[in-house]
Amino acid sequence: MAETVKLVYQGSTYEFPVVEGSLGEKAVDIGSLRSQTGLVTFDPGYASTGSCKSAITFLDGEKGILLYRGIPIEQLAEKSSFIETAYLLIYGELPSCKQLDEFSHHITHHSMVHESIKNFYDGFPNNPHPMAVASAVVGSLATFYQNELNVRDEREIEITIHRLLAKLPTIAAYSYKKSIGQPLLYPDNSLGYSANFLKMMFGTPCEDYEVDPVAAKALEVLLILHADHEQNCSTSTARLVGSSMCNLFASVSAAIYALWGPLHGGANQAVIEMLQEIYDDGGDVRKYIQKAKDSEDSFRLMGFGHRVYKNFDPRSKIIKTMAHKLLETSTTKEPLLEVALELEEAALKENYFIEKKLYPNVDFYSGLIYKALNIPVNMFPVMFAMGRLPGWIAQWKELQEDENFKIGRPRQIYTGAKTRDYTPIEKR
Ligand code: CMC
């Protein structure tokens, strides 16, 4: 018999169905709660709210499991490429050779941006944050392709997906080039996704630039690890904006802004700034652990804790190993890695962190890898955005194809003034 949950309220009993996911997750379907009882639910931060059914990503925060379309993240990080992983997330299956060739071809051949987009970069003030630039330029793409924005037209969605995946690295690299006063380089179609991005970031028109394959591989793995994470803040933003049937460029532009905050994609930048602060302050990690524990102090250990992972973050394990490898082969020593290792070791022995189940998350080590790749700190969240793009696209597409498609519109509990009369200004 189908499971139900009973709610007793004001002497009446109401019954709600339990829905079950393919890996055993259960939820109460309260879709008819308000019409049956007059009540709404109250769940700030949506900690207990499932906003959709989704077949894209599964994660188990207690066991530290992360699957894209059923495949463990560890296998994808080791064996797949970012483009193949993007295909998997967006279309649900690993591509055949032919499908992968075609998909890669489209993405490679849409990587140039319209020449007049370059003028936008001149309009920003000096040294703008590249996250603001990335979001603004992605949003502006809708003006260049305004006859192909129909969210119910498969072909128009398809070409928008190719354009977004192809152009975001170009847009991101241009914002960096502009900030350091160097000429913008055209994409190089002979290179893979990550190598092309690194060349646009660090090459100049004056000389040949050889992309380091170790750096390109490290970036590729980081992008895969960030590619989706079910209903996080930026993905929920992409879905909510998309739920008004707004186009994919606008939804991704909004998601980039949502990702910018220090509690989400901005955390990798915040981690490096924190590690640098600790290092400059003499490297006493205990002092900062005390600060993080002090309820009177707003300081938090950046890169620690996660809304869902309460045991360990599987992505941080892979990244930690990679950070070690990359920094071992690097000719310059990275003192911040030492601070990070000490901080992690000391924090994991503290009752405060054990009891609250606070472990290093994906951002704790990713910033160190970006640093080893010479990517400037303010570009870190943009790197996260490049990685998360397939996830935003896949989730937006799934929403548009959902047979129960509805505009997102949460309720609230009003706590403001009771009804009262307007007071004329001379009587206030
Ligand atoms: N340092 C010190 N205390 C912490 C930390 C931390 N990093 N994170 C959580 N806590 C404490 C918090 O003070 C609270 O204590 P109490 O119960 O006494 O009030 C308790 O742990 C629960 O914290 P919360 O803020 O209610 O938990 P949350 O699930 O709402 O927040 C989080 C999750 C990731 C926003 C939070 O852990 C945090 O601010 N971490 C630092 C920022 C960070 O690394 N963000 C990257 C997240 S992973 C990448 C991504 O998905 O974007």
Image (cartoon, helix red, strand yellow):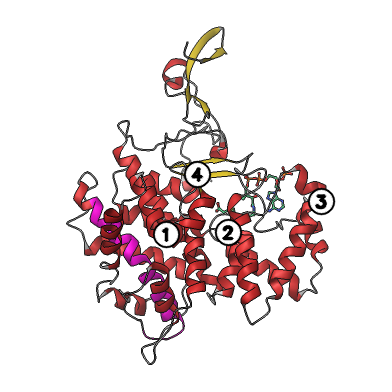
Residue pointed to by mark 2: 262
Tell which circle, 1 or 2, labels the residue nearer the N-terminal end.
1
For residue 243, above or below residue 270: above
SS assignment at label 2: loop
**Inter-mark Cα distance, 2 to 4:** 25 Å
Dot 4 alpha-carbon crowd within 10 angstroms: few under 14, some 14 to 19, many 20 or more: some
Q: Determine contact: label 1, label 2, CB under 8 Å.
A: no
**Inter-mark Cα distance, 3 to 4:** 30 Å
* Residue 204, x across and y down, in percent: 40, 87
Q: Determine contact: label 2, label 3, CB under 8 Å.
A: no
Q: Quadrant of residue 284?
A: bottom right
Tell which circle, 3 or 1, labels the residue nearer the N-terminal end.
1
Is 171 a magenta residue?
Answer: yes
Residue 164 visible at all? yes
**Inter-mark Cα distance, 3 to 1:** 37 Å
Q: Mark 3 or mark 4: which is in front?
A: 4
Report the disc number at residue 350: 3
**Inter-mark Cα distance, 2 to 3:** 24 Å
Is 84 a magenta residue?
Answer: no
Q: Amino acid at mark 4?
A: Leu
Residue pointed to by mark 4: 67
* Count of labels in the image: 4
Rendered residue at 58%/73% (across/down): 371
The magenta stretch is 157-183
Rendered residue at 50%/15% (across/down): 3
Residue pointed to by mark 1: 82
Asked whether mark 4 and ligand 1 are closer than 8 Å, the reply comes as no
Dot 3 alpha-carbon crowd within 10 angstroms: few under 14, some 14 to 19, many 20 or more: few
